[in-house]
Every structure is written in C-alpha cells, then in structure tokens.
Amino acid sequence: MPTQPSRRTFLKLTAAATSLTAADLAYAIPASDSIALITDKSALLSVESVHWALAELHRACAEKGLTLSTPSGKLAIVVAPSSSSLAAGFGRLPAITQPETAALLPGSYRNVPAILVTGIDARGLVYGLLELADRIQLGDDPLEVLHLTTPIVETTPNKVRSVARAFISEVEDKSWFYDRAFWTHYLDTLAYARFNRFNFALGFGYDFPRGVTGDYFHFPYPYLVELPAYSHVAIEPPIAHGERQRNLETLQFIAAETDRRGLEFQLGIWTHAYEWTDSPHADHRITGLTPETHAAYCRDALSALLKACPQITGLTLRIHGESGIPEGSYPFWQTLFEAIAIAGRTIEIDMHAKGLNQTMIDMAHKTGMPVKAGAKFWAEHLGLGYHQADIRAAEYPRQGVTGTFAVSSGARNFTRYGYGDFYGQRDDITLLYRVWPGTQHHLLWADPALASGYGSAAHFCGAAGMELCEPLTFKGREGSGHPGGRNAYADAALAASHPDTDKFAITYRVWGRALYNPESGSDVHQRWFRHQFGPSGPELQSALAHSSRILPLITTAWLPSASNHSFWPELYSPISILPTTGEPLYADSPAPHNVSAISPLDPQLFSTIDQHAADLLAGTANARYSPSEVIAWLEVMAETSTQALSAARTADNRRSTSAAFRQAEEDILILNGLGLYYANLFRAALSYSIHARTGDPQASEASLNAYRKAHDSWAAMAQRASRVYALDISYGEPRFRRGHWIDRLPVIEQDLTALEQHFAAKSEQTGSASTALAHLAGTPARPSVAVEHMPPAPFQPGVDLALSVSVPESVTSAVLWYRHVNHGERWLSIPMKRTGNTCSVAIPSSYTGSPYPLQYYFELRTAETATLHPVLNANLSNQPYFALMPVTV
C-alpha cells in the first residue's frame, strides 16, 4: 500500500475530521499506549469476512504488544461504511462509488488522532483492515507506521483477480491438500495480497487422456462424491475406505475458508475423460461408465458437488479436445450444463477460450449464468507487460481440419494462445485472462514493474481481469512427482515448513497488489523486504526485480514453442545453432528449427535473428525491436541484478545467510546465469546467420567466441545449482520437462563442437561482415524521437477515424499500423501525409465499421534509423500501442 496517493486512483480528502458520534467499542482494554478500535453497528460489519479481518488486526496488535482499548489511547481506528454516522464525523468524505474500494482516512476521534477505515462493501473494509494489520506486522514501530498524513483511497480496475492452484501429483500434493494449517496460511497470503478469487483446479495433469500414470483427481468426480444411482461406478484399484469422504470434507473446508476471507471459490474441472488410452501404468482406472451414461453421470456428480459445497461461485471448464470430449460433442456439454442451471444460485461459467465457438457460448447462456472466456495471456508463458500485438504464423486459422481438434486446430486455431476474436462479442461474453506457468515453473520471480503492466493489461478493452496459475503449478505432472513435496531442494537448509508458500510470498504480494491497483506504490513491497531482510532488503528487491524480467523478455522475443510443456526457458532443452536435420524438438517452430530461425512470440513488434542479420548486412533500418537490443537488455538486467545482489549480501551479513535470503539469492543467480547464456546464444546465432550469408571468417570467429561464453555462463550457473536443487526437478515425464541444468550441458557442448566443425570446413567468402559485426559489438541505440500524440475519444464505427502525430524535423516519414483487436486478423499499414511537423492519416470507415475495438501504433523513420511510437519503456512494462473502444449506444 503506498503512503502517498497515486494521481489516478487515489482521492483527496478535502476536510479534516472534527468530532464523531456515539460508537460501539469493539474492545475495551485500558492501557496508556493502546489503540482504540471502534466499529459501526451496520450490517456490513457483521459480514464474516469483515469479522475475520478484524480478528487479523487484533492478532497483529497482540503480536506487537499493543492492546485495543477505549478512546483514551494514542490512536483510534474507526471502522465504518462510508454512509454511516461514524464516517460522517470525519467531515466531507471522498465519493466512494466502486466496489472493493479501500479507504484509509486520517482524522480525529474525541481529540485523539484517528484513522477511518471505510468503503461501500465488505471487501473494501477487509482490504483496509488488512492494510493496517500488514503495516503493524511488518513495521518496527506500530504506532509510527499507522500515522497517516495523507488520505489513501484505492480502487481496482480489475473485477477478477484470481490465483489457480492445481492438484497434479498424488505423491507430492496429498500432503498439502489435507493440511488444514497450510490452507489457512495460504489463503491468508492471497487475501493480504488482495486477490479476490481462488481457483482450485482438478484434472490439470495431462493434455490428453493417454499415457496416463498419475491420475488421482484426473477425472475428479469419483474421488469426491458417491452417487447411489451410479453405485457401479468405481475406482480401480479402490482408494482407502473413507478417503472419498475425506476428500470431499477437505474440499468443503477449502471452499469455506476461501469464502471466510471474502474470496470467491472457483472449482476447475479440466478433464471429463474417464478412460485412459495407451496407459498400461495408470495408477487407477474408472470403471462402470459407458458412452451412454457418461454425460448423465457427470451432470449428477457435478450437481452433488455444487450442493455439497455451497461456496462454489464458479466453474472453470476446458471444453476443447484436451478435455477428453471430442470437439463438436455438444450433447455432452448441454447435459452437463443442466447441473449448473438447477444449482439454485449464481455459478459463473468460465470456458477455456481455445476452440470456443458460438454454439458453446449459446449453450452456456441458456443456463442463465454469467459466461466468461478464459483466454491465455502470452500463450502458455510469461511475456512482457502487454498483450502480444500479433500471434505467430503457426497459430493462424486453418481450413480442412477434422477429428478431435477440428475446431481448436482448424478455423479457430487463432484462439489457442490469446484473446482470439472474442472482443467482437462483447454483449455475449466477457474475457478473463489466464497466465499460464510456462516461462518460470520453479524459480522465484517478483518484478513490480512487470506486475504493474499485467495489472493494466488485465482489463484491456474491458476484460474482467486475470488469473495467475501459481508458481510450481505443474510440479510432479504426468506421474513425475517425488516424495517430499514440491520444492525440489537438494540443500535441506533451504526447505521450510511451507516452502512453496513462504518462498513465493513476495510473488503473491507483488502480483496481487498490482492486479488490484496497477499504480500501487513501492512501499507495500519495500516494507516486506525491510522486515524480512533488514538493510539487505532494498538491494535484494532490486536484484530480484531485474532478474525477474529476463525470462519474460526471452519469451516475448524468442519462442521455440508456445506450449509450456515443450519450451521451458528456465530449464531449457537446447536446440542447435545449425539447421536441424532430424525431427525438431520444438515442432511448432519455423523450419529449419535452429536458433536463428525461431519466431518471437510477438512477431509484429520483434524481429527474428535471421531477419536482423539480413537487415544488418543490407543496411536496412527495421523499426521492430531487434535481437541486438534484446541482447543488450539481457546483459544489463543480469549485470544490474548481480551488482544489487552483491550489495545486499554486504549490507547485512547476518541476514544474508538465512534460508529465506539464500532461497532468493540462488534463484537470482540462476536467472542471471540464464540471462548471460541467452544473450550470448543469440549473439552466436546472429553471427552464424551473418556468416551463412557472407562466408566471412570474422563472423565464424565471432559466433564461436559468443557460443563459448554462452557455454561458460551455463556451466558456472549449473554447477552452483547442482548444490542447491535435486537432479530431477520434475514437471512431466519426457526428459525436456524434467531434470537439471547440469544435464543440459553435454548437449550445449556437442552443439559447440558441431559448430566448430562446421566453420572449420572450407566455405567460400561471398561478402564482408565487418559493418554488421561492428554493429553487434557496439551498444544498439534506438533513436529518441520527441513525439506528441493524443489518442482520440472512443471512435464511431462506420466513420473515418482521423489520427495525427507531431514529429520533429528529423523524422522523414511515418506509417500508421492498425488492426481490429482480433488475433484472427493481421495488421494493416498506411503511409501518413506530412504537413509541417504533423503527420496525418485516417483509418477508413469501411474498416472502423465493425464491433471490434481498434489498436494502432506509428512507425517513424529518420534518414538512417527507424523506431516505433509508443516505444517500450525502460523496464519493458508498458503497452507499446494504443487501443480504442467503439462508441456504444
């Protein structure tokens, strides 16, 4: 929580408080240094979540030796809705109209300094109370940290701020699933971070119902409910007596505790297959179902679950072929949806956007329930802080596809990894973005700047919000789990009682608060680092922030596969600098599947390595972000992080040896080692591509030198990591989903040897690479152009949309790039007309006449260079294009 208000989201209190009316004293413990807690008698204060938050405040005070007393104390905390007489005593209040608004307003109560905690709903009061509790718990002087000089009023643009946690591995996950102390601790973490939804995901363990081993909860219903009408449905071999009831009671506990903290409880059911094909080693099998009884059983079982867990407020459903239901099997879904329609309460239906079509949307609407499309954000990975401007060619629509994936791999192929065309159906369905755990499965990540970008992108063009698949989501997937939990530490000193929760506490805090308020100040994170690490905290925070940007940049600029089960940049399975001759490891990468041919995940704004090599040799100015820029960014991130980490170590020698510090330190070092590896890998591939076009021996020498540096960075990082992590960090059965950094080293060494042999063979020199290599050796400088552009108000569909930009004399030409906000379409461009210092153009009425929002950006050229507007900012966290909504009637 920032101590100073943000210009956009904070409201000013215009008058100081004077006196208050009579109050209900919640606690009365006389003490000279006590805090008075005064609560209003309104119905809002009787809500269970508010009671829980008041108890949290009471606990925080008790832990710091503070008592809650009469108003004779040094400070009064007044908790009341903004409409109450208690709140009125603070004078003229800011106009609070939005749900979940948290307001902390300084004033006085009976001549004692006071804080009013207010809002218009329970969540607003909960967030205000937890903010005070957090300040008390993490502050050195509780009374000092509660001294507010400025009103704080925060609102959220994101209606949904969710975390999904999946049960994946029976051997790794049963321990935390049954551990009720874990759940109270975990859900506390989410509530303090201001998430407002928790999604417990089942059936997430496999993409397809074949080759199944670890299948516990994969088809979840038989593990949770027993239906008398389907007594013949069984799990073979049977689970222990009473285990089904224990599972249901645990689910009921999780749901109730989620609700008690004011969070919505979402149940994810990702698989409806009940038979596993080609699965001789499956742990269990479901017997007694047939194709004729399958849909009815699922309906009745879901109905029983909804009745048993009244706190379930929504369902997340995978509806494409990976669910085990062939696409186009509409009678199955129509039958299943009957359970939702008769639930007797509102149940939100969140359908995975991949392959989602109008038929499924219409069926969901017939239930009378709210409907959302759960779209992937940056495919199955973690990219930069904006929506990818375009999808890769591999995701373009396809014709003539049949079979299980006839829809999602055919005409609606473009819905696999983004928002698809759902913005054209705004009256029909709402988008919810889901951040998949592909880029960083295992290592700690927490960058406030990147999280702020995600917080802004979450409500892009009116979307509902965002759900994060939590860190470690796929740990132990596909039967690869190991006894002992999910942390995978070889160094026992780094394990904790709840390692996956405690280690990632700062991740939840940074991302939850940024989703709640993308403009949150840094104090909310700084206070946590100061409390945890003392004088080392600020530098450790900087080190972690910079290292956390490394892999999202890799994902955006260079993506061998959109699947998180194929490409794992954190524990990368290397491909060759040389063209691939056999079956490619990453099948959805462009031929010839070598490093320099790989497409960016955002090919509209980022250039490939091969294209950049061609541009350098031709002297062509390309406005896209180049691999040279990516290399420079990676090296700066790694160097800045390394320096900050060194400073953190020396700032407090005692705390730098703690397990919590070492957990962060070791992950930061791995990330920085990866940053230097990728930077030099790209430099080696770029020099190789230059050599392939020129035969210049300077290029081959540069390529080998860079690749040797990449090898050395990986080797040093892997050697240290071998003392930290177990040799099998398992996220799936195939080798590229498990293992250790050290076991990737032989592949890198083999490729380096192959590259040496390739260059050793005589090749004819057809050109000079001197100029291109000189550019690569230097620091790329994107031109700084003073540009002025004011995006227009919402546009009128079917009317020309005039756009203009003011540019300096150095700009010789400008081009407008534009597109409907629809990943099924490609970008268009129009040269702009210059008059004086103004470049103008109009998007034609024939194009604006659609239900879609519009997005656009400018390409600007000088005599020698090219750039874009808007440009990515220094921390790569902003939206590099403009988006406009159509006027609605």
Image: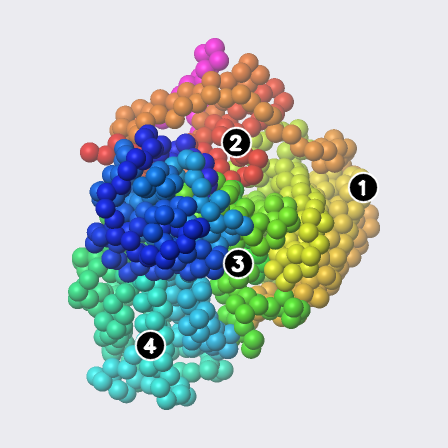
> In this figure, which residue is indicated by the disc labeled 3?
504
Residue 255 lies in quadrant? bottom left
Q: Is residue 145 left or right of residue 127?
A: right
> In this figure, which residue is indicated by the disc labeled 1?
697
> In this figure, which residue is indicated by the disc labeled 2?
871
Q: Residue at x 55, y 66 (%)?
A: 499
Three-letter amino acid code of the residue under disc 2: Val
| Callout 4 secondary element | helix
For label 2, count other residues whose C-alpha is less than 10 Å away and answer few (under 14), some (14-19) or many (20+): some
From the viewer's perspective, is the residue at label 1 or at label 4 nearer?
Answer: 4
Q: Residue 33 appears at what percent x and percent y?
A: 44, 50
Q: Residue 58 appears at what percent x and percent y?
A: 39, 58
**Mark with earlier residue (1, 4):** 4
Task: Tell me, yes or no, if residue 156 can be seen here.
Answer: no
Residue 250 in the image: above or below residue 199:
below
Q: Residue 484 appears at what percent x and percent y?
A: 56, 75
Q: Residue 114 appears at what percent x and percent y?
A: 36, 42
> In this figure, which residue is indicated by the disc labeled 4?
249
Three-letter amino acid code of the residue under disc 1: Pro
| Callout 3 secondary element | loop
Instruction: Give the distance between the C-alpha atoms of the residues marked 1 and 2, in whole angstroms.
Output: 36 Å
For label 1, count other residues whose C-alpha is less than 10 Å away and answer few (under 14), some (14-19) or many (20+): some
